[in-house]
Amino acid sequence: TGLQFGTVSACTDSDDPTGALVLWDNLDCSGTPVLDAVVDDTCSELPTDNSSSAFTIRLECLADVCFSAHSSVRMSNGETKSVQEVKIGDSVESVDSRGRRTFSEVYLIQHEGKVSATTLRQIHYSTVGGKGSGAITLSGAHMLRNAIEEDAFVPAGTIEKGSTIFVVPQDELEATEAVVTEVSSVRHPVRNIHTMNDRIV
């Protein structure tokens, strides 16, 4: 893929014009990249060493799979933080493949520092056993758990009033069934937190 230095053509959409640019100085994208940066379709300075080496790029869209930056998450030390306060290396509340509460280390945070608002879905729910109620605010492409044993998920954009999801109530040790009572749209800044087991509560 050819690249004209000084020009960045990033994957974009109207709500979040952010992309990831990874650049190597070889043709098979192996080894350590010479550039690994978040770009936003603006002019970006690229590294050069006055050599004539060909550059190969891999241009990726950052997944539109995000939580509201204002959402809360429990840390392994019992503290509660907003998603925007979470840092790489933190251990955050998660679930294992059977829906049991655990904690998992954060290794990547996308959209960190982003302050502009994105349209999100706010899904209100009430647990079937009366153990609690609450709301989840996330992007429509974000996957929500719809089964305990099978580790199965559905996009939040397909959830509607009356849908069944699984949540982990604050004082419970495993996921429990909840019925969606209301779905609305809100606009918040976002964060996309990646954990080692690819789940976050």
Image (cartoon, rainbow, N blue to C red):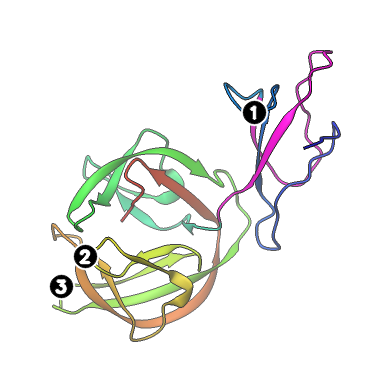
- Magenta range is 35-63
Which one is in front, 3 or 193? 3
Q: Amino acid at mark 2?
A: Ile
Is residue 128 found left or right of 80 in the rendered image? left
Q: Give the residue number, with chain letter if any, for mark 2.
A: 148
Residue at mark 3 to residue at mark 2: CA–CA distance: 17 Å
Q: Give the residue number, with chain letter if any, for mark 3.
A: 131
Residue at mark 2 to residue at mark 1: CA–CA distance: 40 Å
Residue 184 drawn at (x, y percent): 48, 79
- Going from N to C along the chain, the mark reached first, 3 or 1, is 1
Q: Amino acid at mark 3?
A: Lys
The local secondary structure at tag 3 comes to loop
Q: Name the residue located 53 percent from the left edge and 72 percent from the top edge.
A: 186
Dominant SS type (magenta): loop
Numbered badge on residue 28: 1
Callout in the foreground (3, 2): 2
Contact, CB < 8 Å: mark 3 with mark 1?
no
